[in-house]
Image (cartoon, rainbow, N blue to C red):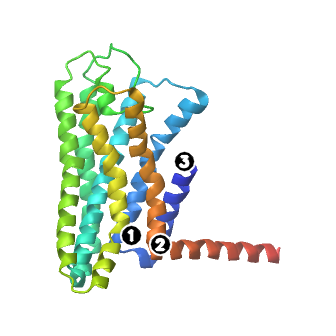
Amino acid sequence: MFFIILVGNMTIIAVIWQEQTLHVPMYLFLAMLAASDLGLSLFTFPTMLRIFWLDAREITLSACFTQMFFIHTFQDFESAVILAMAFDRFVAISHPLHYSSILTSSIIAKIALAIIVRTLAVQVPLPILLRRLCFCHSNVLSHSYCLHPDILKLSCSNTRINSIFGLFVLLSTMGLDFFLIFFSYILILKTVLSIASHRGRLKALNTCISHLCAVILFFTPMICLSVLHRFGPKLPSHVYVTMANMHFLIPPVMNPIVYVVKTTQIRHKILKLFTKKGSVTTQVTFVT
């Protein structure tokens, strides 16, 4: 699975990077999504492999804080990228004639910068606030990696400030992103229903299928996990572990597959890239 994540997401990034025709908002956002999936996997999957293959179950507190910071950073980054992709779909469907003038290269750069600034602004305080706590309870985590709610349970200090700030981060990032994505699709649906032809409506909706899959894959396990952690009844630990694994591992695996299957240009460019490499290899071998 880790191999699929690496190859799939790195291939998408490489194809979009090399092909000038793909340097348009939709595919630039897709490259950002692949980068966030790749980063998230690099800070979760190796730890799982280390636990299950080598039975190495220990991690220092500093390393745990570092892992937690990068996991939540890439998590928030991906949420913001999915929101940006929703905005891209809204502009493409609702204002097709002004698409290129609205989503210019400078606007894309500003959106990317805003995503990075917002993510760091809310995530940097998390490990700083954790360092003021004392940890004297059980040192066993519920998951295969370090998550903020999980670390708070190990503290014997007052974690009220940490819990409030953690909830604020969740609601102001992924919570707000999900609401704006939902609202954008209401506007998209309103525009689609105003299209006269049945074929035109289907064509417009078809351009959103890949993005809708990304939304469902990312937000469904995350929402369920957050609700259960904060408000749900006490459940067996394997329930939380399974849902966390679904949230962190399924999107990086499925997003490249969905976009390659549903996006003709990406699929053709990948085939072109590998066909070109194959022909070059054959030619070199023949000359030798």
Specify whether residue 17 is in view. Answer: no
Residue on which disc 2 sits: 266
Which amino acid type corresponds to the residue marked 3 in the rendered image? Phe
Q: Residue at label 1?
A: 27
Q: In what element is the residue under mark 1? A: helix
SS for dot 2? helix
Left or right relative to 103: residue 34: right
Q: What residue type is labelled 2?
A: Ile
Q: Which x, y percent locates residue 260?
A: 48, 67
Q: Where is residue 117 in the image (x, y as percent from the top left)?
A: 25, 51
Residue at left 21%, top 23%? 159
Q: Which of marks 1 and 3 is nearer the N terminus?
A: 3
Can residue 253 be seen from the camera position used here?
Answer: yes
- Which residue: 28% across, 34% down? 228
Horizontally, is 221 left or right of 249 in the view? left
Q: Which of marks 3 and 2 is nearer the N terminus?
A: 3
Query: Which quadrant would residue 240 be assigned to in this image?
Result: top left
Q: What residue type is labelled 1?
A: Tyr
**Marks 3/2: CA–CA distance:** 21 Å
**Residue position marked by numbered label 3 in the rendering:** 2
Expressed as whole percent of the image width and height from the top left, the position of residue 133 reads 26, 20
Structural crowding at the residue carrying mark 1, measured as other residues with C-alpha within 10 Å and reported as few (<14), some (14–19) or many (≥20): many
Labels 2 & 1 near each other (Cβ < 8 A) = yes
Tell which tag, 2 or 1, sits nearer the viewer.
Answer: 2
- The crowd level at tag 3 (other Cα within 10 Å; few <14, some 14-19, many 20+) is some
Q: Is residue 68 left or right of residue 169?
A: right
State the CA–CA distance, disc 1 to disc 3. 23 Å
Query: In the figure, 72 relative to 176: above or below?
Result: above
Q: What is the secondary structure assignment of the residue under circle 3? A: helix
The image shows a total of numbered marks equal to: 3
